[in-house]
Image (spheres, rainbow, N blue to C red):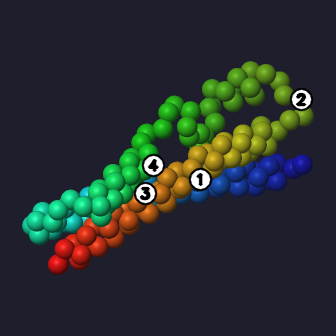
Amino acid sequence: MSERYEDVILEEARRAMDFQVAALDELRARTGILLAAAAVSGSFLGAATARASIGFGFLAGAAVVAFVLGVAFCIVVLWPPGEDAWIFVNSPKQLIEDWVNVEQDGQSMLLFLAECLEDNYDKNERRLLDLYRWFQAAAISVGAAVILGCIQLAASH
């Protein structure tokens, strides 16, 4: 295999990792916006409910539970991961130990690195998909909190 193909393969592996980093950044940004929207809507609906002197009934209780769940799910998405949660690069020290200090017969470091990046991508992808599920749960919970709060206010008038 010529060096040219190996370069292309490694570049594709790096591009995949770049897209994954961008997807994670975008998910975190969306989650921050959802958390801010939850705070604003919760404050607005809570103040409107207090002004209207509405009793704390089933709808209000359900809205509070949905709000708390939505905030908790957002925190799960935004919480800093453990040390080994995300792997976007390979260790230069490890590459030096494996490739400079040891003779590699007939193997290509570029292909090895591309394979490592793909393995890291696969591990990251599973975690990223889990975070998307948490985000979806947060969006549904916040939406439910807003809808239930609005129904509570509308029913009181």
Give the residue pinned by disc 4.
77
- Find out whether the residues at labels 4 and 3 contact each other: C-beta distance under 8 Å: yes
Dot 1: what SS?
helix
Label drawn at residue 129: 1
The part of the image, by quadrant, that contains residue 153 is: bottom left
- Find out whether the residues at labels 3 and 2 contact each other: C-beta distance under 8 Å: no
Give the residue pinned by disc 3.
138
Q: Which residue type carries mark 3?
A: Ala
**Viewer-side label of 1, 3:** 3
- If you read the primary sequence from the N terminus, does the residue marked by circle 2 or circle 1 appear first? 2
- Residue 118 seen by the camera: yes
> Where in the figure is residue 68, as x and y percent of width and height?
33, 51
Q: Which residue type carries mark 1?
A: Leu
**Viewer-side label of 3, 2:** 3
Label drawn at residue 66: none
Q: Which residue type carries mark 2?
A: Asp
Residues 120 and 45: in front is 45
Give the residue pinned by disc 2.
105
- If you read the primary sequence from the N terminus, does the residue marked by circle 4 or circle 3 appear first? 4
- In which quadrant will I find the C terminus? bottom left
Q: Is 41 positioned to the left or the right of 27 in the image?
A: left
- Find out whether the residues at labels 4 and 1 contact each other: C-beta distance under 8 Å: no
- If you read the primary sequence from the N terminus, does the residue marked by circle 2 or circle 4 appear first? 4
Dot 4: what SS?
helix
Q: How crowded is mark 2: few (under 14 residues within 10 Å), some or many (20 or more)?
A: few
Find the distance from the CA under tag 1 to the CA under tag 3: 14 Å
**Going 74% across and 26% down the picture, which residue do you hit?**
98
